[in-house]
Amino acid sequence: MSSPLWITATPLASDGELHIGHLAGPYVAADVLSRSLRADGRPVLFTSGTADHAESVELRAARGGRKPEEVAEGFRAAITADWLRAGVRFDQVVRPARDRGYRRWLQELFLDLYAQDVIVPRTRLAHYCESCRSWLHGAYVTGACGHCGARGEGGLCQECARPNDGELVDPMCVRCGAPGRPRRSRRLYLPLEPMRELLADHWRGAGLPPRLAVLCESLLEDGLPDIPVGHPGEWGVPVPVDGFAGHRVDSCFESAALHLFGYGHDKQPLPERALHFCGFGHAFCHVVLLPAILVALGLKLPQEFHVDETSGIGPDEGDGGSPLWALDLLTEFGADTVRRHVLTARPQGAGGGIGRADLERTRALLDGTWNRWLSGLFAAVREDSAGRVPDAEPGGEGWEALRHRLRRAAEDLREAYGPEAYAPRRVVAVLDEVVCCTADFGYVNGFERHRPSGAGHHLPALAAQLAVAAALTSWAWPVMPEGATRLAQALDMAPGGPVIPEALAPPAPGTRLAPPSGPVFGF
């Protein structure tokens, strides 16, 4: 068997619950691609993890009077449960604070890079809070980015995605509000400039989206920075280098390395291709640090990137300013509605809104088109064919033209589902067109039931619509797996087949249908 196509999604900090903006970013889109490839019989490895050692986890623990391990464990369990509720199925979710062997693996990787002089000691100015008597890094400091001026935390700027270590303007300690003072600090760094040609060659061959290409070219033009890979602290994996007792591996470096642990690159060859799904604010770890680690290890991995823009999804103004937690919306609207909507509103450009009112409109669309057509079809089969698939070839007024259109739609779906031209928003649009055209066909041919010349004229049209319903158990499964599974059960079929024109075939004549008591898609 060929090596799997490796799909990754950004590790999520285990400092809070899963937000709807997270689903709208990398996770649902990556899962849809994973499902479509598996349905086509292609080997896939879909991995992610939780950033348990992020500074924000330690900060949240301190504010709540808890241990960081407790915070990481609790929110990790909630995040992974919500992924499952949303239908996001990973093959591997790395749990840094819990997975056996992870700490030793990361320390051995760190020592390997140190032995090669890829990681080296440097003395640089860093932010220090004299009031708290502690170094300020990551979530412990806020200020204006020295590159773009956007205000945010230390580490990586969420607006321009560049590292801002020691370069924040007007830095402020998050714990006490005191200004951060510059102080010389000796830490371990990963200098990128010695890898200039290798990284530039990697980026040229990666087919970067325009905004990522601008980031990488700007880094090259300005001179590649030295990236801190350790800092003084108490939470995280201890730096295993002599002379740096009390230092911990930096969470950004760890997030990049975490992907290699999830794949198990030291146990099996790397795949021929990897696709990374991430938000632009986290792109540095994927597009710069991970390739740097691979280059240092002498490994080559063709990589592609699917980057969603920073999602400015905050409190739901239509619901009294309450946060839009994924669990609440999945419970209220169901995974199908949420998944379908975030694909159309995914912040990859000019997306739509994500709030309860927006999800209500999506649910109304599913009810008014998809579910209305299917409920009418099931009712007609029950009344006119004793609840069984009629013994008739698909046909009816306009069927040949519609069939040709549907077969073209299948090819469009296959292309939009594929990794070469992945376009989930296009997938949703084509699926809606399939349903609407078929519903129109069913309405027009429904008048055949009243033809005085004899019974049975309408049965070919029922068989034709059942062929479309059967196709949707495959065509819609990557986007709305719950509804596609319910539809398949109603038709006595297996869901999740390949997205091909040949799926357009009704169940065997005489098959008894078992429609669900409620809506097929969403609820």
Image (tube, rainbow, N blue to C red):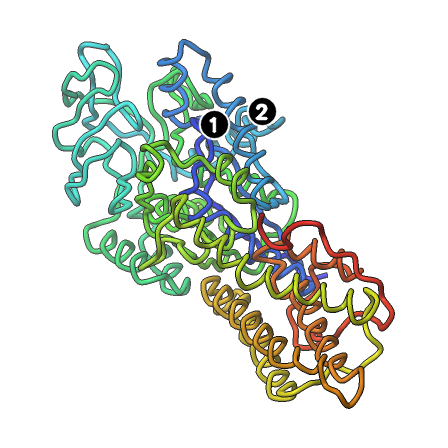
Callout 2 touching callout 1 (CB < 8 Å): yes
Relative to the observer, which residue lies in front, 211 or 259? Answer: 211
| Relative vertical location of residue 205 with respect to residue 93 in this rendering, above or below | below
Residue lying furthest right: 510
Lateral position of residue 171 relative to residue 415, left or right: left
Please name the residue shown 52% across and 37% down the image: 49
Please name the residue shown 31% across and 41% down the image: 191
Badge 2 amino acid:
Arg
Lateral position of residue 179 relative to residue 46, left or right: left
What residue is shown with label 2? 98
In the image, residue 36 lies at what x, y percent? 61, 61
Total numbered badges shown on the rendered structure: 2
Circle 2 sits in a helix, a strand or a loop, which is it? loop
Please name the residue shown 52% across and 72% down the image: 433
Label 1 neighbourhood size at 10 Å, few (<14), some (14-19), many (20+)?
many
Of the image marks 2 and 1, the number of the one nearer the N terminus: 1
What residue is shown with label 1? 52
| Relative vertical location of residue 49 with respect to residue 221 in this rendering, above or below | above
Q: Which quarter shows the N terminus?
A: bottom right
Relative to the observer, which residue lies in front, 30 or 444? Answer: 444
| Relative vertical location of residue 73 with respect to residue 507 in this rendering, above or below | above
In the image, residue 212 lies at what x, y percent? 32, 56
Badge 1 amino acid:
Asp
Q: Quadrant of residue 261?
A: top right
Q: CA distance from mark 2 to mark 1?
A: 9 Å
Q: Quadrant of residue 512?
A: bottom right
